Amino acid sequence: MALRSLLKREESYALHALLLLAEEPGLGAAEIARKLKAPPAFMAKVLSKLAKAGLVESRMGRTGGVWLRVPPEEVTLLKVMESLFGPVALDLCATLRRCPTEERRGFCHLKPNLVRLNQEIRRAFASLTLKDLLPEAPKEA
């Protein structure tokens, strides 16, 4: 059976691009796409969304490129995901006042568990920052 990713392809590229920029600030969009083996037009779209969200900035010209606008320790995985597609939920049923099963039967045993899982997933994504995913700087002797 094929695997299914919980992250959308755009979210994955965004996270990898942000990590790359934390290590190599000022790269151009084409260079980011090349290093991440991403389609250049798709990477440009991802970087544009990240710029609109205030996570990166682009500078044009000979010394142009893309830089992080926010320190890596302030960028959570949840912030990146939500900057691209809005609030994260495991299943929209958990966001409804009354889900279809509640409408039909008057109660639903699935919904409270989905609500709990949504909270746990959001907490997990919010607890992980870009800094947590970067290699540690070498310690000085």
Image (spheres, rainbow, N blue to C red):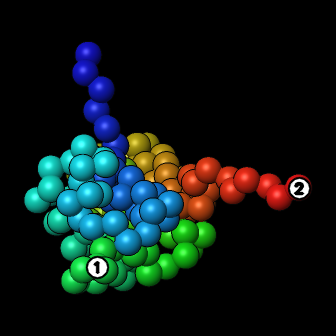
**How far from the left and from the top, in percent, is residue 19?**
46, 58
Q: Residue at x 30, y 26 (%)?
A: 3
In-front residue for pair 120/115: 120
- Dividing the picture into quarters, in which one does residue 59 lie? bottom left
**How far from the left and from the top, in percent, is residue 113?**
48, 46
Residue 119 relative to residue 5: left or right: right
Q: Residue at x 24, y 43 (%)?
A: 37
Q: Quadrant of the N terminus?
A: top left
Mark 2 and mark 1 lie on one chain; the one further toward the N terminus is 1
Q: Is residue 70 above or below residue 82?
A: below
Kind of residue at badge 2: Ala
Q: Is residue 66 above or below residue 120?
A: below
Q: Residues within 10 Å of mark 1 (few under 14, many from 20)?
A: few
Q: Residue at x 88, y 55 (%)?
A: 141
Q: Which residue is mark 2?
A: 141
CA gap between label 2 and label 1 equals 36 Å
Kind of residue at badge 1: Gly
Label of residue 138 in the image: none
Residue 122 relative to residue 58: left or right: right
Q: Which residue is mark 1?
A: 64
Q: Residue at x 31, y 48 (%)?
A: 35
**How far from the left and from the top, in percent, is residue 126?**
54, 63
